[in-house]
Amino acid sequence: MKKILLLLVAFFSSNAITAQDWLINRTDWGSTDSLVESNLHEISYITIHHGGEIFLKERDTYSYLKNLQTWSRNARQWMDVPCHYIIERKGKIFEGRPLEYRGDTNTSYDPTGHALIVLLGNFEEQEVLEEQIASLKVVTEYLIKTEPVSSKDIKTHKDYTETLCPGRKLTEYLGTKDWTNFLSKIYNE
Ligand SMILES: [Zn+2]
């Protein structure tokens, strides 16, 4: 019995080392799994989105994600929520579709090879919050360090197709020195 306990402790602590401590995993937000082994892809792009609907800071992201998952599967016949990382208004980062599966889109570009990050809110109208930018940097840095993405392949949805996404205010931010300095710092490390 003691041996089993020790093995369990070893298993969970080694898991804790590999897990990203900044990430709220799928199981933590109540995701159900109906994933099939299809649409696997290799990441070579990072593509930034906004949620597109007004999202208030107080809104419950857990139930938003569960509803989004149900809608994605039932109304769209997608395997899961469309994006890989979801950043809520308070800056918490949620795991969406597992990264190894190609994402989905309502528009006409092929998301194969794209790591999709979505910041919740409508940035044509709402401000991008500091907490969201900080978390965007955490996810982006992680992806740059773990996937072969070159700096020219970090773009936004509207760089690929006709859309307002990721909204004017987020687009403005991504044109600032703060963002470009952040990227060049990671690439020069
Ligand atoms: Zn988008």
Image (cartoon, rainbow, N blue to C red):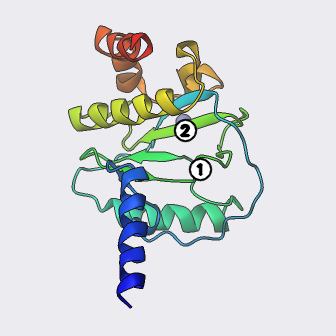
| Quadrant position of the C terminus in the picture | top left
Q: Nearer the viewer, residue 170 or 145?
A: 145
Callouts 2 and 1 close, C-beta under 8 Å: yes
For residue 9, above or below residue 184: below
Q: Quadrant of residue 187?
A: top left
- Residue positioned 31% across, 8% down in the render: 177
**Helix, strand or loop at mark 2:** strand
Q: Nearer the viewer, residue 13 or 90?
A: 13
**Label 2 near ligand 1 (CB < 8 Å):** yes
Point out residue 81 in the picture as x, y percentages from the top left corner.
56, 56
Give the residue at mark 2. 116
The residue sitting at the bottom extreme is 1
Quadrant in which ligand 1 is drawn: top right
Give the residue at mark 1. 82
Q: Can the viewer see residue 127?
A: no
Point out residue 32 in the picture as x, y percentages from the top left corner.
54, 72
Real-space Cα distance between discs 2 and 1? 8 Å
Point out residue 85 in the picture as x, y percentages from the top left corner.
47, 45
Instruction: Characterize the local packing of mark 2: few (<14), some (14-19) or many (20 or more) Cα atoms within 10 angstroms.
Output: many
